[in-house]
Amino acid sequence: MPSARALVLLLVTLLASIGAYETHAQTNPTQLSRNLERKLKRDAARMALRLNEGEDLRFQSIRISSGDMESIYKALVGMHNADENVRSIFRCNVHTRANPSIDHMLIIFDRNIEWAAPLRAGRHETTSITLNDLLYDHDLIIEKHVQWNDTHDAISIRSKNPLNMAALANEFNNIEGVQSVDLGLSKEVGNNITATRVGSGWRFVFTLSFGSLQEKGEKTHNWQYEYTDGGKMTKVRESGDPVPEWLRCATDPVASFSR
């Protein structure tokens, strides 16, 4: 059993470690948390995929362009590190809307189809060679198996990495017994980020959505920035409805702005 002296030394070491971590966090306000890093990577994936939205995503590549995705992510991190106002926008949880789908789908199928026997037995697996190959090739997992209605069941599929799920859904639609694939796309309004390639960089519009949709309709406030591949950042304009005091998230005062 540790002595009292050893316990005291351990406690002092732990307190010193915590203090060092807090000091590091305070002196490095630009350091990304794991949660924000994950969100920005998902934002970059969606914005890279949206670059092709002029065409039907179902007929595009399942893999999202890694070049665009990495370039957009680098720009988002660069703006976060360069500007306190951008950091405050992220603190307001301004991220891309969950459209298009990059990691989830729901496959609805005939409950009695032969390949679903393991699912009916409570295992998250199937005997369909085609379905199993898709899971393996694209690093997908079956998260859940549920009863959908009187004649159909459904399995939720999650991708470990961002993918064009609309294109992947086409592959699952061709499997015998599959009735439909639901990508769970929401038509609701909300916060968003858009990216447009301009010259040798990107133009971003951050949209903060607030207000009662039922009573007065959606209200939005927008920040527009440009970030070059060389790391130069420019605030282009700020516009929209005044941000309520309670929703500032430490953003700069917006008493006046261009419309």
Image (tube, rainbow, N blue to C red):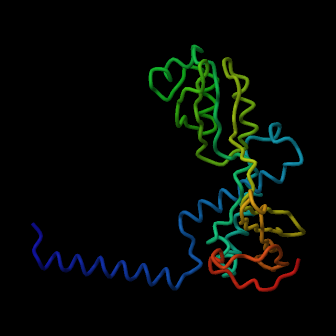
Task: Give the camera-side residue of 11 and 144.
Answer: 144
Q: Position of residue 53 (x, y in %)?
A: 85, 48
Task: Report the label total.
Answer: 0
Residue sticking out furthest to the front: 215
- In the rendered image, the quadrant that contains the N terminus is bottom left
Q: Position of residue 162 (x, y in %)?
A: 66, 48
Task: Give the camera-side residue of 206 and 245.
Answer: 245
Residue 246 vertical position relative to residue 120 in the rendered view, above or below = below
Task: Give the camera-side residue of 69 and 150.
Answer: 150
In the displayed structure image, the side of residue 222 where residue 145 appears, left or right: left
Q: What residue sits 12% from the left and 70% below the top? A: 2
Residue 74 is drawn in which quadrant? bottom right
Q: What residue sits 77% from the left and 71% below the top? A: 221
Q: What residue sits 71% from the left and 62% below the top? A: 212
Q: Position of residue 33 (x, y in %)?
A: 54, 68
- In the rendered image, the quadrant that contains the C terminus is bottom right
In the displayed structure image, the side of residue 107 where residue 3 appears, left or right: left
Residue 132 is drawn in which quadrant? top right
Residue 60 vertical position relative to residue 215 in the rendered view, above or below = above
Q: Position of residue 204 (x, y in %)?
A: 80, 68
